[in-house]
Structures are given as C-alpha cells and as structure tokens.
C-alpha cells in the first residue's frame, strides 16, 4: 500500500483524511520541489541535509523515529551526527512540513507540505502509520471541551491512538493460526 495513494474521506463537512502512506499524493521529487518552493517563499532554505531528512520521511511513508533517520543518514553520509538530524527536524517542524508524533516519539510528513493545519492525528500503535483528519469544527469542539474542563493544550497536536486496518487484518490472520497470536502479545509487553 505504499506509494502515491492517499486515503480520502469526504462528507458534508468537507472532512479530509490523509494517510501518510504516500505522504503528499505526489511523486517524491515533486513533493520535495513543493517543499523547497514553500521554504523559499518564507525566506528560508531547504538545505541539502534538511531536504534529505524530509526525503527519508517521505520515502518511509510512516512515522519514523529520529534515530532511524540518523541510521539512514549515516548510510548516505557516514559522518552524520545526532545534532545534524535533530536540527533538520527542528527546522522542518517549525516550517510546518512535519509533525512530531508525541505518543510514539517519531516524526511524520504533514499531508500538505504547504498548508499544515494541525488536524487530528490518528496513530497506529503497532506500525506507526499516521492519518490526519481535517475536520476544523470537530477540532474546535474538542478544544472547547478540553478548555471547559479547565485544561490548556500544551501544543497544537491532537493525537488519537489506534490500530490501522492493515494491522487489524494482520492480527485477525494471526488469530487464525494457533500459537501465532502469542508472539505479538509478548512483543507488546517488552
């Protein structure tokens, strides 16, 4: 299911669900060109390192941990150090090109590289797939309820945890094989 395909859900409220599998619905090169143009419009520069980190995130199609990105960078540039990757991620976050997925301590490309709107992120706790739900009215209502309960959000991100359809299907297939279901449960407790 990797590639340029996006999950799109449209209803009367013009809600959009964008899966990070395929990240921006365009080819890798056109997505990078769009990000580069966006940065230039903002008076910023998508340096080769920043571009490579963004490219690795786009290519993964899933939320990716910083140290996995560092490992991939070291295969390309053997001298890459953690601060290099973290500085690139900080820039990409500030520019609104990526999201930090707090619940799994990972990063994912924003579904729209030029108009990050801080939707509601649904994160698969098994594989790291991230889907952005863009329903401004739902988000506003949720934030209003949170504030009415006396809380103030510490950031723009709202994350929901779940299990994506692919992982649900994998679990259902494992359940059909006696003894196979014990392995994922054991891994979940480690």
Image (spheres, helix red, strand yellow):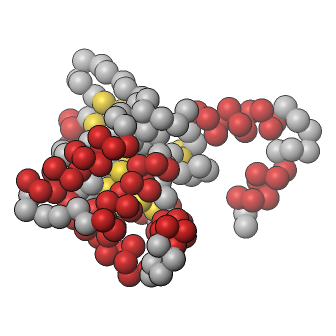
Give the vertical position of 10 relative to 113 (above or below): above
The structure residue drawn at horizontal position 37% and vertical position 43%, both measured from the top left corner, is 28
Is 173 situated left or right of 66 in this image? right
**Residue 140 percent coordinates (x, y):** 20, 43
- Asked if one can make out residue 99 in the rendered structure from this viewpoint, the answer is no
Is 81 situated left or right of 153 in this image? right
Task: Name the residue furthest top.
Answer: 12
Give the vertical position of 7 relative to 46 (above or below): above
Is 188 situated left or right of 141 in this image? right
**Residue 84 percent coordinates (x, y):** 37, 78
The structure residue drawn at horizontal position 20% and vertical position 35%, both measured from the top left corner, is 137
Q: Quadrant of residue 91?
A: bottom left
Who is closer to the viewer here, 163 or 31?
31
Is 147 situated left or right of 43 in this image? right
Give the vertical position of 155 relative to 117 (above or below): below
Q: Quadrant of residue 133?
A: top left
- Asked if one can make out residue 124 in the rendered structure from this viewpoint, the answer is yes
Who is closer to the viewer here, 45 or 116?
45
Quadrant of image for the C terminus: bottom right
Q: Quadrant of residue 13?
A: top left
């Amino acid at each position: 299911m990797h590639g340029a395909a996006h999950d799109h859900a449209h209803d009367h409220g013009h809600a959009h669900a964008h899966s990070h599998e395929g990240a921006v619905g365009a080819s890798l090169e056109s997505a990078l060109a769009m990000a580069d143009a966006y940065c230039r419009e903002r008076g910023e520069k998508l340096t080769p390192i920043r571009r490579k980190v963004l490219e690795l995130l786009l290519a993964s199609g899933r939320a990716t941990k910083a140290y996995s990105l560092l490992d991939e960078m070291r295969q390309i540039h053997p001298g890459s150090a953690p601060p290099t990757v973290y500085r690139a991620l900080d820039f990409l976050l500030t520019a609104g090109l990526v999201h930090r997925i707090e619940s799994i301590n990972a990063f994912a490309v924003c579904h729209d590289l030029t108009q990050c709107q801080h939707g509601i992120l649904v994160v698969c706790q098994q594989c790291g797939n991230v889907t952005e739900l863009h329903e401004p009215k739902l988000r506003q209502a949720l934030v209003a309820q949170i504030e009415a309960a006396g809380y103030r959000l510490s950031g723009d991100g709202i994350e929901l945890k779940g299990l994506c359809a692919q992982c649900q299907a994998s679990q259902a297939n494992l359940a059909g094989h006696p003894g196979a279901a014990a392995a994922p449960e054991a891994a979940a407790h480690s």
